[in-house]
Structure formats: structure tokens, C-alpha cells
Image (tube, rainbow, N blue to C red):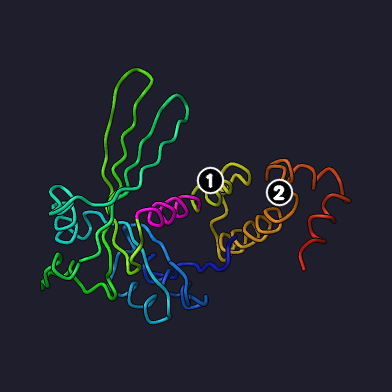
């Protein structure tokens, strides 16, 4: 469910705007996840100061830290506990191995490089090694790296990463496919922001009404039947 959003003004970037959104939400006891763009010391500090925990993807936009973590998992000092999941989809079999390491104080050296701005509360690094077996017999393996202030177990780490991807599948993909958002052509004044707010308000209402049918079907039935539309709106208290 969408709780808040903010439009980027002028030359602001997504990192600054995300900070403005985080200021609107009570983060105490929450685990805030973000992609590699938000793996930034100031964002982590904001979450930490507001009582939350953070977990970010780690990529080459922080080259020194990324190299440290990738080098560690390439040759860890001791066997690490692993949580493994297997999914089959579209004829492919994907096996994911989730590994974590908590003794980060001796792992990550203090550096003066700009990309090594302190990550307050850093308590864990993690890796997901995903191997996909394709129907034609090919096999591909990728590794993704993460940092977190929460000392997650491999099982909880797997759940946190999967929950993060549900944002893409349950929000952005639905806005594109059910609301046709990507083809919107409104560009002037406050039109894009206002319509984005209306779409997300509508999605929040539809999400909580009749969970047994799809968002697309609920939109169509609301247009066909005033009684169905009233029932969807009426359950919002």
C-alpha cells in the first residue's frame, strides 16, 4: 500500500526526494529497503536517526565497498550458514543461495574515499547467488550484494529481499499494466503529480476490496456496476 509520495522539484534528485518522503513516515522498528541508488550515508543516517533499520542493494556506485564485499564472499574465511530457495517459472528453475556475515567491523576498513561515506549502524553484509537453469539446458549464475543495519539471519535476509521485489511486482507493474501509467502523456504544471496521486489512491482502495479478484477485474466491474463501486469505496473506514 502506498503511504506517501513526493514530486522532484527543479534540480532535486531521487535521493533527496526519498529523504523528504521518509520524513513523513514513522520509521520506528521498521526495516527500510532501497535499491543501490539509495545506498548512501545520508539516507542511512536519516533512517537510523528516526529509529528504523535499513537494507540497501550494493553495486558499483560505491566501488570500494562493493569490491570489499564481493572479495569477501569470493573467499570467505569460514563456511557461512546458507538459506536456499528454489522457484520454477516459465520452464526455468532458479536456485537462490542467501548468505550473510555479521562481523563487519574487521571486514570493512575506514577509508577517505567519497564512496566510503560512513553507513551508520552497519551490522551485516549479504549475498544472493542465483543460478537459473533454462529449458534449453543453459545455466547462468549471478551474484547480488547487500548491506544492512539489521543483523538478519539468512532466512530473514531472504524474506527482506523478496519483500522488496514485491514493491515492483505489486505496485509499479500494476500501475503500468492495470492503469496504463507508462503511456500517460500529461506533462504540464501539476498534472503528472495529481494524476499519480489519484492512481495510487485508487489502487489502495482496490487493493483492500475483494482480494479474491484481480485489480484489472475490479476496475472494470467498478465501471460497469455502481453497486460494486460503492462496495469497494464503502469498505474504506
Quadrant position of the N terminus in the picture: bottom right
Who's the residue at 42% across and 74% down the image?
A: 52
Look at the numbered disc 1 and give the secondary structure of its residue: helix
The stretch drawn in magenta includes residue 158 = yes
Disc 1 crowd rating (10 Å Cα; few below 14, some 14-19, many 20+) is some
Quadrant position of the C terminus in the picture: bottom right
The stretch drawn in magenta includes residue 56 = no
Residue 108 % position (x, y): 15, 66
Residue 144 % position (x, y): 28, 48
Q: Is residue 13 above or below residue 173?
A: below
* First of labels 2, 1 by sequence position: 1
Instruction: Give the residues drawn in magenta, as a range.
Output: 154-166
Q: Is residue 10 above or below residue 71?
A: below
Residue 6 versus residue 93: which sits nearer the camera? Answer: 93
CB atoms at circles 2 and 1 under 8 Å apart? no
Kindly identify which numbered label has been placed on residue 162.
Answer: none
Kindly identify which numbered label has been placed on residue 211.
Answer: 2
Residue 120 % position (x, y): 28, 76
Left or right: 185 in relation to 40: right
**Residue beneath label 1, please?**
173
Amino acid at each position: 500500500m502506498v503511504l506517501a509520495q513526493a514530486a522532484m522539484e527543479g534540480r532535486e534528485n531521487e535521493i533527496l526526494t526519498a529523504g523528504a518522503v521518509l520524513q513523513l513516515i514513522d520509521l520506528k522498528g521498521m526495516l527500510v529497503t532501497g535499491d543501490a541508488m539509495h545506498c548512501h550515508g545520508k539516507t542511512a543516517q536519516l533512517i537510523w536517526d528516526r529509529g528504523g533499520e535499513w537494507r540497501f542493494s550494493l553495486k558499483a556506485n560505491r566501488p570500494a565497498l562493493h569490491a570489499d564485499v564481493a572479495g569477501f564472499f569470493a573467499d570467505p574465511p569460514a563456511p557461512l550458514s546458507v538459506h536456499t530457495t528454489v522457484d520454477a517459472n516459465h520452464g526455468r528453475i532458479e536456485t537462490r543461495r542467501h548468505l550473510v556475515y555479521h562481523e563487519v567491523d574487521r571486514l570493512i576498513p575506514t577509508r577517505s574515499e567519497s564512496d566510503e561515506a560512513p553507513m551508520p549502524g552497519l551490522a551485516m553484509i549479504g549475498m544472493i547467488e542465483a543460478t537459473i537453469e533454462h529449458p534449453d539446458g543453459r545455466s547462468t549464475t549471478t551474484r547480488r550484494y547487500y548491506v544492512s543495519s539489521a543483523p538478519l539471519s539468512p532466512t530473514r535476509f531472504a524474506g527482506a529481499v523478496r519483500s522488496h521485489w514485491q514493491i515492483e511486482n505489486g505496485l509499479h507493474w500494476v500501475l503500468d499494466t492495470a492503469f496504463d501509467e507508462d503511456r500517460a502523456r500529461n506533462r504540464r504544471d501539476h498534472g503528472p503529480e495529481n494524476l499519480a496521486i489519484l492512481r495510487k489512491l485508487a489502487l489502495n482502495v482496490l487493493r483492500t476490496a475483494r482480494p479474491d479478484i484481480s485489480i484489472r477485474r475490479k476496475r472494470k466491474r467498478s465501471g460497469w456496476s455502481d453497486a460494486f463501486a460503492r462496495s469497494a469505496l464503502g469498505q474504506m473506514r
